[in-house]
Amino acid sequence: MTRSRLALIVLGGLALVGVSLFAHTVLLRLPHDRLAAAAPKGRTFAPPAIGGPFRLTSHKGETVTNESLRGKPYAIFFGYTHCPDVCPTTLFDFATLLEELGPDGDKVTPVLVTVDPARDSREVLAEYMQAFDPRILALTGSEEEVETAVKAFKVFRRKVPSEGGYNMDHSALVYLMDREGRFFSTLDPHEDRGARLAKLRRAVAW
């Protein structure tokens, strides 16, 4: 095989990978109603397998499961109390979005699940959440319970050693679930606030 032919094959393979990743990202961002509409006639299109059974404890001491959250949409985010920027920013953004929703703000449950249960006990979360909107639920549990939730939502988390301790790398997307606990869409921090607000309104009306 000539060098030029090999180069063409490699470039072609990279192009296919790029198209595949792009398609996956686009599909993940589409609400399941739009996914169904985009499917060829006569065929169904299942939404991405985001979400699943989990059982955790809230900062208020209540047991919270995927089933107990059913009945109204919820927006679930994975973070931790030692996070220096993304997590508090996301939580403050939740508060702003709830305020802008007006009366519909009470029809959505914002949820923070810790990715650092070793440090984020219920008591730590209870103190931390005093700085944020009281409608936001913060959840923790054993390492195994948190790992179950992390896997259900396809979340990335990794402990990174740092001076004096460690930090946690983690996914920053907010997953928006409908009132039946099915994946609806994502709230990307890089999106325009108006776009995120529109998604929340659609989830409430769905």
Image (spheres, rainbow, N blue to C red):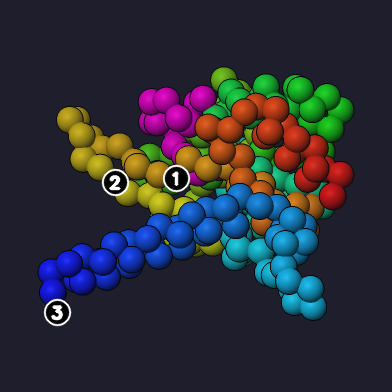
Q: Does the segment drawn in magenta span residue 130?
A: no
Give the position of the N terminus as an image quadrant.
bottom left
Task: Report, in whole angstroms, how far the alpha carbon at label 1 lies from the one at label 3.
Answer: 42 Å
| Residue pictured at 19% horizontal, 30% vertical | 164
Circles 3 and 2, Cβ within 8 Å, touching? The answer is: no
Which residue does the numbered mark 3 point to in the structure image? 1
| Numbered range of the magenta stretch | 76-89
Name the mark nearer the viewer: 1 or 2. Answer: 1
Q: Residues within 10 Å of mark 2 (few under 14, many from 20)?
A: few
Closer-to-camera residue (36/158)? 36
Q: Does the segment drawn in magenta span residue 84?
A: yes
**SS under mark 3:** loop
| Position in image of residue 58 (x %, y %) | 60, 43
Task: Report, in whole angstroms, how far the alpha carbon at label 3 lies from the one at label 2.
Answer: 45 Å
| Residue pictured at 61% horizontal, 50% vertical | 29
| Position in image of residue 70 (x %, y %) | 76, 55
Q: Residues within 10 Å of mark 1 (few under 14, many from 20)?
A: some
**SS under mark 1:** loop
Badge number at residue 33: none
Observer able to see residue 30: yes
Q: Earlier in the sequence, mark 3 or mark 2?
A: 3
| Residue pictured at 37% horizontal, 60% vertical | 15
Closer-to-camera residue (89/12)? 12
Circles 1 and 2, Cβ within 8 Å, touching? The answer is: no
Quadrant location of residue 171?
Answer: top left
Quadrant location of residue 144?
Answer: bottom left
Which amino acid type corresponds to the residue marked 2 in the rendered image?
Answer: Lys
Which residue does the numbered mark 2 point to in the structure image? 159
Residue 74 sits above or below residue 146 on the image: above
Which amino acid type corresponds to the residue marked 1 in the rendered image?
Answer: Ser
